[in-house]
Image (cartoon, grey):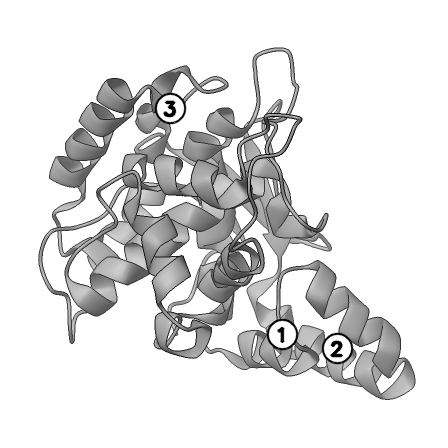
Amino acid sequence: MEKYESSGTANLAGIINKKYYAGELRSEVEKAKLYSKESGVNKIGRGIDYNKIYEKIPYKSGDYEPQYDAEKNLITIFRQEDVKNRLENWKDYIKKTPQKAEQFAIRNGFDSVDALTRELKNPDYFRSALEHEYGHPYSRGVGASSGGEKADYKFVSDKYMADPRELANGLGRIQRETYQLTGRRFEDPNELKAYVESTPFERGTEGYSEEAKRTWNLLYENKGVKEGDDKLTPLLDWSSKIAPALVGVNKRLDGLS
């Protein structure tokens, strides 16, 4: 487990390049930028700010829940040494209020209390949480306009990952892990949707982290949702168009860390 300083600066590229991309991140960013331009994704909301992938952004740890503050351009997160306490507190919460714990886990994108427990037990949990927050600066613009309005699409339940800024970030995590597992990304605007519609959940999400499954759970839950009289784009369709604009890698990464 990598040890992090209690405060400092980092960027998304530094956190993910070696783990997922074997040094190929920059070329993949260029491919994603080209797709974004050609597909019109760069005109959705404020688009995707690829420069933020490389920008050094400060973070500090303490008595915080993980959060990216866009106005302050600052990431706050819990202390790395508090990970065990968070797990124990969660176990106590399950024992005392099992129904509320189940509701909390589902609302936050996990499919069960056990899934959230596995995430908290993950030795890579702190780095994973930090990665999540560093994914927001570059991807969040596609989920909101300059006036602050959130992207509008049709979905079946108002869960945490259904927030467009969280969804865009979560799709980036799926792309990174897809390359780590298979050596290729979802490159076509219809490919992610076709994958969800044709692949059973257990097989389709096998090998992915619990963090990535938070987004997979939402995508599968929205399988089959059609455009209605409101003319809103279904969440799965929106996600399938956005996904190729998020960075991936073009070579197999088995065995690399």
**Mark 3, secondary structure of its residue:** loop
The numbered dot on residue 90 is 2
Q: Quote the CA–CA distance across marks 1 and 3.
A: 30 Å
Image: 88 above or below 214? below
Image: 91 above or below 240? below
In this picture, residue 20 sits left or right of residue 47: left
Residue 234 appears in view: yes
Give the residue displayed 64% in from the left and 70% down from the top: 82
Q: Do callouts 3 and 2 mark residues in contact (Cβ within 8 Å)?
A: no
Image: 75 above or below 23? above
Q: Do callouts 1 and 3 mark residues in contact (Cβ within 8 Å)?
A: no
Q: Nearer the viewer, residue 161 or 30?
A: 161
Look at discs 2 and 1 and give the one toward the viewer.
1
The numbered dot on residue 106 is none
- Furthest residue in direction right, as rendered: 96
Task: Say which amino acid is labelled 2.
Answer: Trp
Q: Do callouts 2 and 1 mark residues in contact (Cβ within 8 Å)?
A: yes
The numbered dot on residue 49 is 3
Task: Say which amino acid is labelled 3.
Answer: Asp
Q: Position of residue 115 (x, y in %)?
A: 59, 78
Q: Quote the CA–CA distance across marks 3 and 2.
A: 35 Å
Quadrant (top left/top right/bottom left/bottom right) for the N terminus:
bottom left
How packed mark 1 is, by other alpha carbons closer than 10 Å (few <14, some 14-19, many 20 or more), is many
- Furthest residue in direction left, as rendered: 251
Mark 1 lies on residue: 116
Q: Quadrant of residue 108?
A: bottom right
Give the residue displayed 23% in from the left and 68% down from the top: 181
Q: Earlier in the sequence, mark 1 or mark 3?
A: 3
In this picture, residue 171 sits left or right of residue 84: left
Q: Quote the CA–CA distance across marks 2 and 1.
A: 9 Å
Q: Position of residue 173 (x, y in %)?
A: 39, 53
Q: Earlier in the sequence, mark 2 or mark 1?
A: 2
